């Protein structure tokens, strides 16, 4: 599955996204896992941009999903 298809699938259901899916999306858009943050937070980076996402069992909170979608908006081969 290409990164834009993955992004569309995640955008269609932001309340039911597993951490592994969000991780795959970030990596597909050239973000890199930088380091563990404080507590259960994980830090991803791309250039000078940083995003901290709390790791949870089950699904990621929708606010973080929307933030990642906003950060990847308009990139790549989208139609």
Image (tube, rainbow, N blue to C red):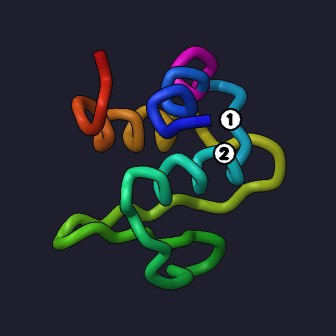
Of residue 61 and residue 17, the one placed in the foreground of this image is: 17
Query: x, y (%) of residue 14?
Result: 58, 25
What residue is rendered at 59% in x and 52% in y? Answer: 24
> Circle 1 sits on which residue?
17
Q: Secondary structure at mark 1?
A: loop
- Residues at marks 1 and 2 touching, judged by CB atoms closer than 8 Å: yes
Quick check: 55 above or below 70? below
From the viewer's perspective, is 75 left or right of 13?
A: left
Can you tell which mark lies on residue 21? 2
Farthest right residue in view: 58
Query: x, y (%) of residue 5?
Result: 53, 26
Q: Residues within 10 Å of mark 1 (few under 14, many from 20)?
A: some
| The image quarter in which residue 41 lies | bottom right
Query: x, y (%) of residue 52?
Result: 44, 64
Q: Residues within 10 Å of mark 2 (few under 14, many from 20)?
A: some
Query: Nearer the observer, disc 1 or disc 2?
Result: 2
Q: Looking at the rendering, in which quadrant would you find the C terminus?
A: top left
Quick check: 41 above or below 60? below
Of residue 61 and residue 29, the one placed in the foreground of this image is: 29
- Does residue 21 show up magenta in the picture? no
Quick check: 56 above or below 1? below
Query: x, y (%) of residue 31?
Result: 39, 63
Range of residues picked out in magenta: 10-14
What residue is rendered at 49% in x and 39% in y? Answer: 3
Please count the marks in the image: 2
C-alpha span from label 1 to label 2? 7 Å
What residue is rendered at 25% in x and 37% in y? Answer: 75
């Amino acid at each position: 599955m290409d990164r834009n298809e993955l992004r569309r699938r995640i955008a269609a259901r932001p309340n039911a996204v597993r951490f592994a899916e969000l991780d795959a999306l970030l990596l597909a858009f050239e973000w890199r896992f930088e380091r563990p943050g404080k507590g259960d937070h994980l830090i991803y980076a791309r250039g000078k941009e940083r995003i901290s996402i709390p790791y949870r069992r089950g699904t990621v909170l929708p606010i973080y999903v929307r933030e990642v979608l906003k950060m990847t908006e308009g990139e790549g081969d989208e139609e």
